[in-house]
Image (tube, rainbow, N blue to C red):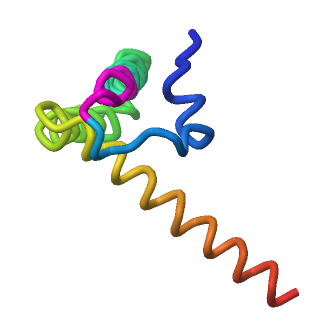
């Protein structure tokens, strides 16, 4: 299953989390991430996966609570994480 918004988030620096016109992208991203997590929960059927499945179900609920009504906050969070990661990679490259 292809999730275009998930695949393209790192390539979408043009998405402005303060621009209401970009909210459709954020909603699609949020919904696709939730669907990915729910699909993973559905795959976890063996007894040894009981606790990880329970934890992931809780994570899905928390994710819905955090970003359900505010999908642009998800974009803001992802962009912040990607920016931090890029800085760490640049710092590591400069040490070499």
Q: Is residue 21 magenta?
A: yes
The location of residue 95, given as percent across then percent down, is 81, 90
- Tell me the quadrant of the picture where the C terminus can be found: bottom right
Is residue 19 positioned above or below 3 on the image?
Answer: below
What residue span does the magenta drawing correspond to? 20-29
- Residue 21 occupies quadrant: top left
Q: How many marks?
A: 0
Instruction: Name the one closer to the observer, 20 or 84.
Output: 20
Q: Left or right: where does residue 88 sit relative to residue 69?
A: right
- What residue do we see at 42% from left, 50% from top? 78
Is residue 46 in view from this perspective?
A: no
- What residue do we see at 22% from left, 39% from top? 63
Is residue 50 positioned above or below 43 on the image?
Answer: below
Please tell me whether the stretch drawn in magenta is mainly helix, strand or loop: helix
The location of residue 52, given as percent across then percent down, is 34, 40
The location of residue 62, given as percent across then percent down, is 16, 42
Is residue 48 positioned above or below 84 on the image?
Answer: above
Q: Left or right: where does residue 96 sit relative to residue 53?
A: right
Is residue 71 positioned above or below 27 on the image?
Answer: below
Instruction: Name the one closer to the observer, 64 or 29.
Output: 29
Q: Is residue 44 magenta?
A: no
- Tell me the quadrant of the picture where the N terminus can be found: top right
- What residue do we see at 58% from left, 66% from top? 85
């Amino acid at each position: 299953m292809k999730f275009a918004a998930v695949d393209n988030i790192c390539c979408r620096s043009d998405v402005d989390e303060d621009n209401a016109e970009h909210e459709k992208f954020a909603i699609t991203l949020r919904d696709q991430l939730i669907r990915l997590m729910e699909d993973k929960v559905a795959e976890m059927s063996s007894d040894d996966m009981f606790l990880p499945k329970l934890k992931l179900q809780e994570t899905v609920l928390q994710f819905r609570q955090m970003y359900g009504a505010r999908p642009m906050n998800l974009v803001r969070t992802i962009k912040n994480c990607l920016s931090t990661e890029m800085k760490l990679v640049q710092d590591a490259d400069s040490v070499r």
